[in-house]
Image (spheres, rainbow, N blue to C red):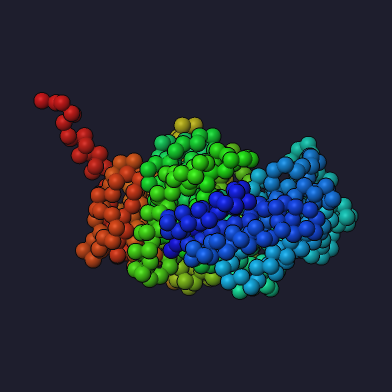
Amino acid sequence: MDIGVCYFPEHWPRERWETDVEQMVSAGIEYVRMGEFAWSVLEPEPGRLEFEWLETAVELVADQGMKAVLCTPTATPPKWLVDRHPEIRQEEPDGTIREYGGRRHYCFSSETYREQTARIVRELAERFADNPHVVGWQTDNEFGCHDTIRCYCEDCAEAFRDWLRERYGDIESLNDAWGTTFWSQHLRSFEEVDPPRHTTASHHPARVLDYHRFSSDQTADYNRLQAEILRSYGDWFVTHNFMYNFSQLNAFDVGDDLDFASWDAYPTGFPQVMHSRSVDEDDLRVGNPDEIGLNHDLFRCAADGPFWIMEQQPGEINWPPTAAQPAAGAMRLWAHHAVAHGADVVTYFRWRRCLEGQEQYHAGLRRADGSEARGYHDARRAASEFADLEALVDGEPEGTVAVLLDYDSLWALEEQPGTDDFDYWEYVGTYYTALRARGVTVDLVPTETDLSGYSAVIAPALHVLSESVAASISDYVENGGALLVTMRSGEKTPGNKLTGTAPPGPLADLVGAAVTERESVGDSETLETRLEYHGESYEYRTWAEWLAVEDAIVAGEYTTGVGAGRAAITERVTGDGSVTYVGVWPNEELADALVTDLLARADATYTADRLPDRVRVAQRGSVTWVFNYRSEETTIDVGPDGELLAGAETVPGYDLAVLEGTAADVTVEPERERESESESEPESGGS
C-alpha cells in the first residue's frame, strides 16, 4: 500500500532533479516511474545510446530511499526510425497512413518494428540489469490508446493470413466456419483474405470478429516479446498499464505474461466519453464509483493478483469535454478506493505539469512553476494513511461472485449490436453495480475460468458461446452453483454464425427455456416496458426476449407491449444448483431483486439493505472501507463488532471511512429516511 509518481526528468533541467526527488520523499512517495516516452532522448541518433541521464535519475531516486520503475519507450518511435523504416507506420481501414507526430503510430505486425523493439528493450535491460534500485518495468504504454490496436497495412494482411492458417488449417474449414456463401464471399485460398478495409456495406461479421481476435493476439504477442527479454536480464516485475473499459484488447491474454496488471485511472473523464447516460456534477467532481470499481476488479483478475494504478488522475485533465476541477479530497478518495479493491501501489500522473507538448493542460501534483498543487496534498495524506493502515490489512479482496467477461461476445455485439442503445460495458455494469450495492466483492473473469470456487456466477450476454464453455457452465450448476445467465446469450457460434437453434443455444437444456422472439425497445420514454417479477412490477430497457418454457418456472412475465403475458424471466433447479435466465436489460430495482435472489440461493453474504447510490463498501482482509461519492454527507453504522480506524460515522461528501470489520456488517442510513427528515425540517427563517 504505497504511493508513486510518474516523473519525466528529461523535461526539466538537471539542476532541478535533486529538488524534485527530495520533495517526492516529503510527500511519502515510494515509487518513481520514468522513461515511457523517451526513445529519442535515449537514442538521439541510430545506435548512439545515451542512458547516463536516466541512470543519474535512478541514482537520485535511490539516494532518497525510493524505488525506480522504468518503462520501455516503444510507444513513441523517434523520427529517425520512422524515416528509415516508413513501413512500421499503421494504416487505417481507408488506407490513410498514421504519420509521425503523435504516439502509438507503429504496427504490431511489423517485423522491422519488432526487431527495433527487441534491440532497444535489450539495451535498456542490459544496462540496468545490475542496478538494485530498478525494481520493475512497464511495457510500452497504454496498448491501443488512440484506436491503435487494429491496423490494416500489408504486414497485417500477411500476418492475418498466417493467423487464419493456424486457426483453421485449410481454406474450406474457414469458408464453413465463416459462412462465406453469403454475398458471394467464398474464398479459394488464404492468399485471398484481406483485412476488413474500407468498403461499401458492412463487412462479413465472421471476418470482422476474427480480425479483432487477430489484432488483440498480435498485441499480446508483442507484449510477450518485451516481457521475455526483460525477464531474461533480471529478477524484476513486468507490468503493463491498461485503459478503462477498453474493448479492443483482451486484457486476460496480455495478463498471462505479466507479474501483475496496472491501469490508468482518470475518474472525471470516464463518464464524459465512455457511455451515453447523462453526466451530473458528482461525475464531473469524482466520477462514478462502480465504473471505477469494475476496472479495479477487472485488472485485479487480469493477472490474478494485486494490481497497480500506474496513472492516477492528479487534478483537472486535458482530454474530456469538461476539464472540471475534482472535488476537495478526490485524489485521496481515489487512492483509497484502489487500495480497498486490491491495489498495492497508486502512482499519480504526473509529478509536475509540463511546459511543452500535447499535455500542457494536464495537471500534475505540482504546478508548472514547481509549487504544490491540490493533488500533492491529497497524495501526501494518502501516503501517511496507508502507512498507518498497512499493518492492519491482512489479506486481499476475495471475490465470492464471478461475472463472466467475454471479449468474443463484446466484439461480435459491437459489430452487430441489434440496437444503437446496446453497450456491452454498460450492460455488464448493470449487474456489477447491483452486486456492489449489496457490498459483494466481484471477480471479473474470462469464460474459461474454473468457477467451482464461486458461490454464484453471472454470465451477461454470452453472445458467442462454444460447446466447451457451455459444458463448463452446466457442470458448475449441476455441482451446486447458482447461475444467472442473461439475454443475448448462446446466439452465435465461435465462427460468429447463428447457431441454428433457439437461444440460448448450448445452454437451452440447462435453462429449460428458449427464446422465440426478440425486440429492441429503447427506454421507457419510447415504449412502455414493464414486467412482473415474483409479484412485483418493474421496468426494463433496451432489449426484450420472449421465452418458451419447457422445464423451468416462469418467474417474470411481460405486462405491457405486444409481448404482454409472455415469459421474460425463468428459474430452474437442476442437479445441486440453480439457473435463472433473464431476457431483458433490467432497471436498477429489478437488477437488485435478481441479484439478491441469486445471492440468497447461493447462501452468499451481502448487506441487508441496498447501499444508497454512490455510496460503496469494499473489504480487503479484515479491513473495510466506506466510500461516499456524492456531495452530501452520509451516516454509517459499523455494527457491534466493527471498529472505526479512520474517519467518523458521519462521512462527509466525497470522503471515506475505514473500519475493522466486514462489509456485510456496515449499514448506511437509507436515502429515503434522510430525504424524509430533510422534508420535515422547517425552512430557514420560518416561524
Residue 531 is at least partly visible in this image = no
Query: 175 and 548: which one is in front?
Result: 175
The tally of labels here is 0
Vertically, is 252 above or below 329?
Answer: below
Vertically, is 647 above or below 326?
Answer: below
Determine whether, in the image, residue 488 is placed left or right of residue 385: right
Determine whether, in the image, residue 460 is placed left or right of residue 397: right
Residue at screen point 44% across, 45% down: 372
Determine whether, in the image, residue 454 is placed left or right of residue 98: left
Residue at screen point 73% across, 47% down: 105
Query: 88 and 632: which one is in front?
Result: 88
* Residue 606 found in image quarter: bottom left
Q: In the image, residue 626 lies at what x, y percent?
A: 33, 55
Quadrant where the C terminus sits is: top left
Quadrant where the N terminus sits is: bottom left
Q: In the image, residue 479 lies at what x, y percent?
A: 48, 73
Q: In the image, residue 630 lies at what x, y percent?
A: 35, 43
* Residue 596 found in image quarter: bottom left
Specify the farthest residue to the left.
687
Query: 214 and 76: which one is in front?
Result: 76
* Residue 124 found in image quarter: bottom right
Residue at screen point 72% across, 42% down: 101
Q: In the image, residue 226 lies at what x, y percent?
A: 69, 64
Query: 317 and 432: which one is in front?
Result: 317
Residue 27 is at least partly visible in this image = yes
Residue at screen point 63% across, 40% down: 357
